[in-house]
Image (cartoon, rainbow, N blue to C red):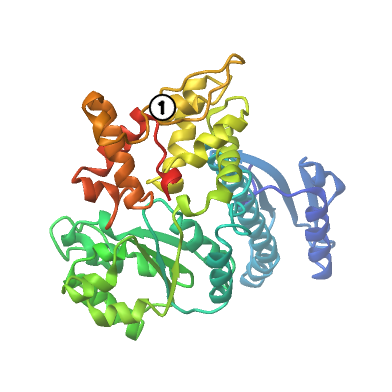
Amino acid sequence: MSGIGEVVSVNANLDAQQIRALAASFERHDLYALSADAAAGALSVFGSPGTGRRRLVFRLADGSGDGFAIADISPDQPRTSSETALRDAALAPLAQALRNHRRSAELDQLRARIDADRESLLQRLGRHTLRDRIVGEDGGLRDTMRQANAVAGSDTTVLLLGATGTGKEVIARSIHDRSSRAEAPFIRVNCGAIPAELIDSELFGHEKGSFTGAIRHRRGWFERADGGTLFLDEIGELPLPAQVRLLRVLQDHTFQRVGGEQEIRSDVRIVAATHRDLVAMVSQGQFRADLWYRIAIFPIRIPRLADRADDIAELAQHIARRVARRLGLPEVLPSDADMVMLRHYDWPGNVREMMAVIERAAILGDGRELALARALGFNMPTTVAGEAEIARPMCAEPLDDDAADWMSLDEAMCQHIIAALRHCRGRVHGPGGAAQLLDINPSTLRARLRKHGLAAGDYR
C-alpha cells in the first residue's frame, strides 16, 4: 500500500459497541468518523473533511492474535509536526482502549483457567466446596468450635492442641475463613518436615547468592502469607535456634531474609499446632518458655475421635461420599452393622485413620459395598442374611485358677489383654495405656485386639 504514512497496531479484539464508542470519541475531537463497516471488522475509511487526508482502520491477524491497525494516507503532502501531534492525540485514546481491552480479555482467560483448576481440585478432593462444613461442630466439636468462633474475629495467636489426625488444620482453616483475613492467603507450614539447615530460608526467604544453591531471590512463608494467616503445624518440632528467630518475628513483626539487610515488616496472623506436650518440653529445656507464652495466648484442645462417639456415624457418611466422588465410584454408605463396628473401634489415628480405612474399604468393595471388616483387619463371621455381625471377643472371660490349666495360649493372651484394658479403662496407647502396661508396641496391641475381636471401647 503505497502512500501509507505510519501504521499503529495494538493487539486486541473489540466488539461493535466498543468500536462505536471509539468513533464517538474521535467525533468529539472533530477529527474522524468511523464507518459502520468497522464494527464488522471490514476495511473502513474515515477522513477529516477539507484536508484530503484519510485514515484506514482494518482488522489484522498476527502470531499474537487479532487486532486493529490504523494507517494514515497522505500521498500528496508531507506531514507537519502539528499534524503529527494531531495524529498522536487521535491515536492515544484508541491505543489505550485497545490495551485495556486486551488486559481485560487476558484476565477473563485467567479467571476461566482458575475456575477450571478449582473444579479439578474439588473433584480430586471429593468436595463440593473448598469450605466444607465441619462435621461435629454441633456435636463432639461443639466446645472446640465455640472457642474457634470466639477468637476468629481478632488477630490473637492461637495454639491448637490435639493428637495426630484430629483435624487441627481443618480448625485452623475455619478460624481463617471466619476472620477479616479470609480473602488473604492461608499458608500451612509443616515445621517437622523442614531440614534444620533450611528453616530460616523457608520461613523468612533468602537473597540470591546468600548460600550455595541460592541461585535466585526467594520469598519466605512469612512474606507469602502477608495479610493472611500462617499455620505453623507441628511447631514443637522446631529446633531451639529457630525458636529464637521465630520469637523475634512474633514480638517485633519484622525479619530479614537470609543474606539480606533490609528489615521486612510482617502482617501475619499465627495459628500454631502440635500433638506434643509443650509444657513438659519447656520443663525439659526442649522448648523455649518465652515462645510458649507467646503462642499459647489462646489454646484450643481438639478431642480424639474416640471421645466423639456421637460424630462417628455422620463423619463416616461424609467421608464415604467424598471418597466415592474422588475415586469415581458409586456412592455406598456404611450399613448399620458397619456403624456399630466403627463405633467399637478405638481409632488411634483419629479422623485421618478413618479416612484411610473408608477409602481402603471402598476400593476393596469395588463400588458394590464398603468392605469395612476387611479394611479394619477383622475376621468377621456372617449371619444367615449375609451381613457382618458385630465384633465380639473370640475368647471367654478370665477363668478361675482351677480351670486356668485348660486354657490355650491364645485364650490366656486374650484374657490378659482384657484385664489390661479394664485396668486402663480402655486406653490403648499413651501414658497409662494398656500398651505401656503390657510393655508392647501400641500397633502390635491393636493388631492383637483385632485378632481376638476385642474393642477397647467396651472396657472404658
Of the pair 213 and 157, the residue shown nearer to us? 157
Q: Is residue 152 above or below residue 6?
A: below
Report whether residue 57 is seen: yes
Q: Is residue 127 above or below residue 254?
A: above
Taking the spot 46% from the left edge, 47% from the top edge, the residue there is 351
Taking the spot 44% from the left edge, 40% from the top edge, the residue there is 345
Q: Is residue 346 above or below residue 385?
A: below
Q: Residue furthest bottom?
A: 252
Locate residue 414, reporting x and y percent.
Answer: 30, 33
Q: Amino acid at mark 1?
A: Phe
201 vs 349, left or right, is: left
Locate residue 47, reporting x and y percent.
Answer: 80, 56
Q: Residue furthest left?
A: 212
- Write down the residue under mark 1: 378
14 vs 30, left or right, is: left
Report whether residue 183 is seen: no
